[in-house]
Amino acid sequence: MDLSYTPEEEDFRARLREWLAKALPTLPARPSPDDWPARRAYDAGWQRMLYDAGYAGLHWPVDAGGRGATPTQHLIFLEETEKAGAPYVGANFVGLLHAGPTIAAEGTPQQRARWLPPVLRGDEVWCQGFSEPDAGSDLASLRTRAWRDGDAYVVSGSKIWTSHAEVADWCELLVRTDPSAPKHRGITWLAMPMDAPGITVRPLRTLAGSAEFAEVFLDEVRVPVANRVGAENDGWRVTMVTLSFERGTAFVGEVVACRRVLGELARQARRNGRWDDPVLRRRLGRLNAEFRALWRLTQWNVSEAEAGGGVPGVGGSVFKLRYSHARQELYDTAAEVLGADSLDLDRTWVLDRLSSLSYTIAAGTSQIQRNIVAERILGLPKGR
Amino acid sequence: MDLSYTPEEEDFRARLREWLAKALPTLPARPSPDDWPARRAYDAGWQRMLYDAGYAGLHWPVDAGGRGATPTQHLIFLEETEKAGAPYVGANFVGLLHAGPTIAAEGTPQQRARWLPPVLRGDEVWCQGFSEPDAGSDLASLRTRAWRDGDAYVVSGSKIWTSHAEVADWCELLVRTDPSAPKHRGITWLAMPMDAPGITVRPLRTLAGSAEFAEVFLDEVRVPVANRVGAENDGWRVTMVTLSFERGTAFVGEVVACRRVLGELARQARRNGRWDDPVLRRRLGRLNAEFRALWRLTQWNVSEAEAGGGVPGVGGSVFKLRYSHARQELYDTAAEVLGADSLDLDRTWVLDRLSSLSYTIAAGTSQIQRNIVAERILGLPKGR
Amino acid sequence: MRFQLTEDQRALRDGVRQLLARRFDADALRVAVASPGPDRALWRELGAAGLFALRLPEAEGGVGLGLPEAVLAFEETGRALLPGPLIATHLAAGTVPGADTGEAVVTAVDGSLVEWLTQADVVRGDASGAVPLRSVDPLTPLHRVGPDTPGAAVAAPDPVAVLLTAAEQLGTATRVCELAVGHARTREQFGQPIGAFQAVKHLCADMLVRAETARAAVYAAAVTADPADVAAARLLADEAAVRGARDCLQVHGGMGFTWEAEVHLHLKRAWVRAQRGGGVTESEESLAVDLVG
Amino acid sequence: MRFQLTEDQRALRDGVRQLLARRFDADALRVAVASPGPDRALWRELGAAGLFALRLPEAEGGVGLGLPEAVLAFEETGRALLPGPLIATHLAAGTVPGADTGEAVVTAVDGSLVEWLTQADVVRGDASGAVPLRSVDPLTPLHRVGPDTPGAAVAAPDPVAVLLTAAEQLGTATRVCELAVGHARTREQFGQPIGAFQAVKHLCADMLVRAETARAAVYAAAVTADPADVAAARLLADEAAVRGARDCLQVHGGMGFTWEAEVHLHLKRAWVRAQRGGGVTESEESLAVDLVG
């Protein structure tokens, strides 16, 4: 067991720090959260900077235009960019972390050539059309229909929880092409151009008051058959294959950020006197233990991925269960530190607290994650 | 909403207190926990004193030899006997609180005349033969078999978690008389004499180190058909009917006892300095809230029973869920107060802590109780 | 002992519930979220129904009822998410002219917060130097007064105000359990209602257990008015409301996460109420002292 | 960075596990419960296998390995419920003659408790005036020393002893998860294995999550030997062991409640270990200070 980094890894870190120190001051001012085109432009600018510096697609395979970095290098990249306060991946999230890897793994040479380079350069933005109002935890029950009409699929239905839909060029879309097949078998993966006729995007306001998501309504949208990745009705497998790209790094930046927040919380408690309450102090101490452990668990998973070529999604379920609870506890503790000010949306951490409510729901509820851990790791039987 | 007691209720309480003050000093010394015959004799003596004073079968119907007391009077009785440090019901538990009421409700006049008076006088002790090694939460899956042979049932199988089996005269026994029927339909209720040939009682040592329970092995034990209460194969209904006797008083004594323990804990914390730790102090404060509420919930349930003639078992599930958790928390807090002494079995509360581990398991696990609450009170659907 | 609602108490509770169902339904709630501000007509109607004058003696033009009835009424306003400084106005009846009839909207300084300061006609307590917050609860405008120190000493809270807040929290606890159960019964995933899954079932069961335990504590405190009972009621009702609303959100999944869903409003209001009356620390400490007193 | 077991570390762990499986199986455990006392022959065998001399330099006749290897070895002794003052003897190797070979059984005063005082050959620390307790753990005889005040100041605990105790707790956390899963897979109620019910499934999943999180913390602390990492490891391992053993008991239902079942021994030992090393309060406080240091 070795927690020190190799000379090569330290060198990678040093060069990255050096570049960040130079690059970050040249960034424009951050755009307003409500200005989607400005946000896209900002995120695209940052991605272009990464591209020019050789950091774009760090974890992508080299033959897909990526840098083929090791999981540990990816961890260092995410750790250092978070610590330096670099921009988040933002509008490029789906392109870089889901649709891109899917196309890299399952696309034809033509598809890879068409779609991957613009993602790496930050030229094209992708959004995700997976969830539907009636298909949440049970994603495979999705009902958005597509049928063949000549060289196109005609798609009708609706999607929900789509981030960046307002500014996306493409949507990685799951549609049902065979309603008579078992639910996992009749699904197809399509790349839908967001400027196609028949698409309506409606912003979806969350309980945090913001419109980070959208609903996407599809009314006989024509998507060329050439935009299908993988075989017809094989979309479920195509989508799942990307999960095998998960190499333990999914929450690196978030854990680093939580540890920073925790330190800020402790210092704020010292300033406002809450530190004198041993109940609060010991709660902060326990959170320190918690996030130290989550950081070590991250390093463990990344090392496992590096040794074995990939962490199965189930290892991610263990991490996500603990992490999502810890992050909610972090922001509940922030509310304890703030006292009455925890009711003020203008105070640091209050909006974050609202957002943290989704952690035990989004990307697989804690209930679903526990099923995964129990059935796939522990081998407990499925219920009847 | 009225929490004051009526003049009649106050009078009942005053006379009871007066009697307890006189009666308790006349009790012999408590027997050793390992001396079953002495325990039986002690419990019988106390029951006889209650009988002579007119308190035996307080909550039983008058036509069964009881006093027909209201649920509130029963609450007062249990509260006052606990506060006065009177003996527990002990060996007479099954007779007074389960087998007796079952016979009172479902027995023939002959059966009532034969079995009820000795229970009230403390002359005969009953034990319960319900659970089996493979039938715990799923009691109705019990497999102890009985078949007719002339005027007797011949019973073979085994029972577990039987208290007072060593000294009982009778066992209320559930047996399977129709293996081909759906599992709830083929069960019969029998009164088995414990001196019948073929019965072997083996003490069952628990994690607390004591043998409060026993296993009972039955090898072709003959039980007269006349000892059957209710119809053949109707034993499940016969057994369940007694639950409708539950009038919210099941945990009265225990809640009173927990409140006393909590006060002792706080005083011990003051003595040994643990009181200076605000984390512990506030935990004690919260437990005070908890047990105050549980006492009020008891009063609520008893009043509801008095108004409506009975609290359904599901109201009892709500109470038991909260109470069993609170009682475990109480003894975990006791361990915090004791510090290193929490490892010493000779210290007060340490054995109680071990016993408290069973509260979320015995008489329906918390998981089963939550199912009951969700399905029977909230109307959520059964899983497939 | 008859620790059950009397016929009159049932009638009162049902009456308030029906009034609120008629005058503050789901549509009205949505309107209020979009533009909060006490609905003066509704406020007068509540006054006419006796919500504010409930505990004022009949000789003084009041309804002449007691704390138990007030607790039942405020449980209903809590359930309905009715906005406005209802408890402060209720407590001002008989002291502040017009409070009893609902003509005057009265708020009060509670610790370092004032709810509805701008919209109220009368403010009790010293609100000088109050600065507005951007309130997490869209239905409760807030101002901050006093020093920026969460632990700073504040005036001892009025136990009646604490108890009525606990009643509102109880209303929330009950309502979010109903919302969760309603969703769990109808929402289907994996080919069955999600309420058929034990994980969801047990979340709902625990919500009910917390709500019913809090109910016993709140109702009893209304009968006894004992300070320790009030502190206990407050702790259990806060817990039942906040954890209940959280679990309700969890049961709703993504569908509860939208602004349009009612769930988040309950959670946010529960958070606001949990800040009233001096915080839980004092309640826990007083209940600890009660054990050795 | 290679935060994974090396080949050698895996071999060491497997070796200890096999030794214990051979020399301290379920029957030996039952015998030990009936008459506790370190098995001197086994003790010497452990000495020969290097458990006590593990971190002693080769020049001093030791194995010359480090904390990570010690943590892996004591995780196995924890898992196996191996009785005796193993950690104290390990820490005495190189100082107390015969400790390294297992000839001498060494115990140590830890706060106000001494384990195995009567049976040990050497006691480190001041055990004068020690009085025996009736130990809750049948496999750990205990004596009490010093004043009867749980909060009294004690010597600062040795961080290595704290970490090795955390390793034992980790062993328990892992083992009870396995026991629960094993039971849940085979025990049938309502016509299916109880592990098919979500409530049981989720208890088991949470046990694994706690164990795996604790594992990362314990192994990392072994690598860094950083005091804050050790404190974190201790908190998480205590939680994983105690709550895990409790949940394991819950999964077993009545069957786990018998003296013969292994489950209660894990819980009781986890309670004993949680009292070592100065209690969790100090660990939490030190981790709070670490945030602002």
Image (cartoon, coloured by chain):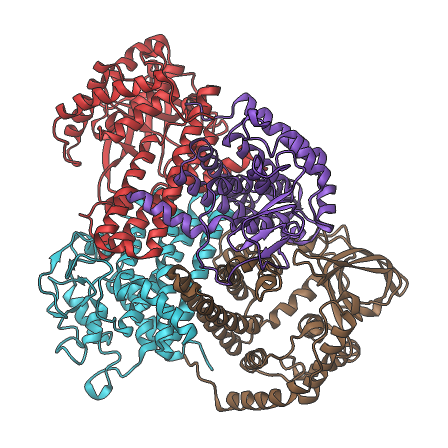
Chain colours: A red, B brown, C cyan, D purple
Residue B131, by quadrant, is bottom right
Residue B225, given in percent of the width and then of the height, sits at 84, 66
* Residue B141 drawn above or below residue B327: above
* Residue D233 drawn above or below residue B175: above
- Nearest the eye: D150 or B50: D150
* Residue D108 drawn above or below residue D92: below
Q: Is residue B314 left or right of residue A133?
A: right
Q: Answer whether residue C21 is visible to the viewer in this image.
A: yes
**Most distant residue in the left direction:** C129
Q: Is residue C260 left or right of residue A242?
A: left
Instruction: Work out which quarter of the rendered image holds the N terminus of chain D and state it.
Output: top left
Residue A299, by quadrant, is top left
- Nearest the eye: D289 or A139: D289
Residue A104, given in percent of the width and then of the height, sits at 36, 15
- Nearest the eye: C162 or D211: D211
Instruction: Work out which quarter of the rendered image holds the C terminus of chain D and state it.
Output: top left
In percent of the image, x 29 and y 56: which residue is there?
A: A276
Q: Is residue B7 left or right of residue A76?
A: right
Residue A248, given in percent of the width and then of the height, sits at 41, 27
Residue A374, given in percent of the width and then of the height, sits at 53, 38
Q: Answer whether residue A379 is visible to the viewer in this image.
A: no
Q: Is residue A310 left or right of residue B190?
A: left
In percent of the image, x 44 and y 69: which residue is there?
A: B270
